[in-house]
Amino acid sequence: MSGQVTGGVVAMKARGLVRTLGSGEAAVRVLDGLDFDLSPGKTHAIVGPSGCGKSTLLYLMGLLDRPDRGEIYIGDLELAAASDEVRTRARNASLGFVFQFHFLLSEFSAMENVMLPMAKLGGKSREEMEQRAVGLLDKLGLADKARRMAHQLSGGEQQRVAIARALANAPAILLADEPTGNLDERNARQVFEQLQGVAHELGQAVLMVTHNPGLAEQCDRILRMRDGRFT
Ligand SMILES: Nc1ncnc2c1ncn2[C@@H]1O[C@H](COP(=O)(O)OP(=O)(O)O)[C@@H](O)[C@H]1O
Ligand SMILES: [Mg+2]
């Protein structure tokens, strides 16, 4: 736990996170006091055995669930105890999500999928949204596939579109739960390398759960979890 907290600029931080799930006899302390900092432009891997609390932690950091105890900060803003309204605003403005399954809209083009979060946030013309979407797809090596329907893309390509979509509103933080878990080794490596390249280039703090030890080793920092704690 000590040693996970570093000096310097911090994009997001967690202090003393505790989460108990289930009730009565079946209650389990899934997260048992976690402290860590996420640095801009760095990739942070979370590794640990199944059931150790990785997804629960990502849900808390994604402001989709609240801890029983502890604080979550984006910049100086504390969000664990903030109102739903403040949390929703922070989520839309500062967080991007990538999941194991891409959840693209299959009858929409790659470009349209990337434009959706921009349309939801508002403030951009259609032309601006298109331009930004194509630019992000280009960064992920998909410039020539921008107008393809999502279902006409390979699994690796779809996951790269999902990363572009997560970056649509230039979030400071990218949360990814086994983003390469559904891909073969070659595609997993390519998707990971592009994710890391984008983080380094655009300055996103990436927090990524992975079961792939080779990819975890390539991250800038590794957080090893066991029974709801860092080891
Ligand atoms: N609603 C719940 N009630 C009780 N225990 C739960 C509940 N949801 C999840 N858990 C337990 O929390 C632990 C952590 O789950 P999870 O965060 O999904 O682990 P991981 O992503 O590391 O595999 C598991 O042991 C799981 O059984
Ligand atoms: Mg999980």
Image: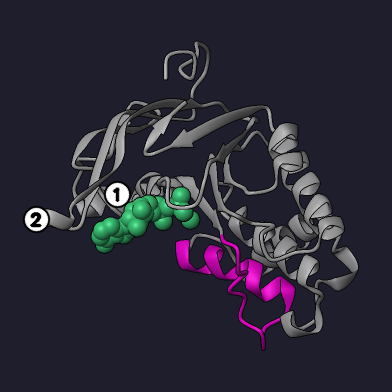
Q: Viewed as shown, does residue 150 lie left or right of 35?
A: right
Residue 87: numbered disc:
1
Quarter of the image with the N terminus in it: top left
Q: Residue at x 44, y 29 (%)?
A: 230
Taking depth in this image into account, of 228 and 164 the one nearest to the observer is: 228
| Residue 115 vertical placement versus 178 (above, below) | below
Question: Which percent across, then down, holds residue 31?
Answer: 32, 40
Taking depth in this image into account, of 97 and 225 the one nearest to the observer is: 225
Residue type, mark 2 in image = Gly
Q: Residue at x 82, y 56 (%)?
A: 185
Residue 24: numbered disc:
2
Q: Does residue 103 show up magenta in the picture?
A: yes
In the image, the segment drawn in magenta is 99-121
Dot 1, how many residues are within 10 Å of its Cα: few (below 14), some (14-19), or many (20+)?
some
Question: Which percent across, then down, holds residue 98?
Answer: 58, 58
User: Residue 12 appears in which quarter of the rendering?
Assistant: top left
Report if the CB atoms under discs 1 and 2 are less than 8 Å apart.
Answer: no
Q: Viewed as shown, does residue 33 lie left or right of 119?
A: left
Residue type, mark 1 in image = Arg
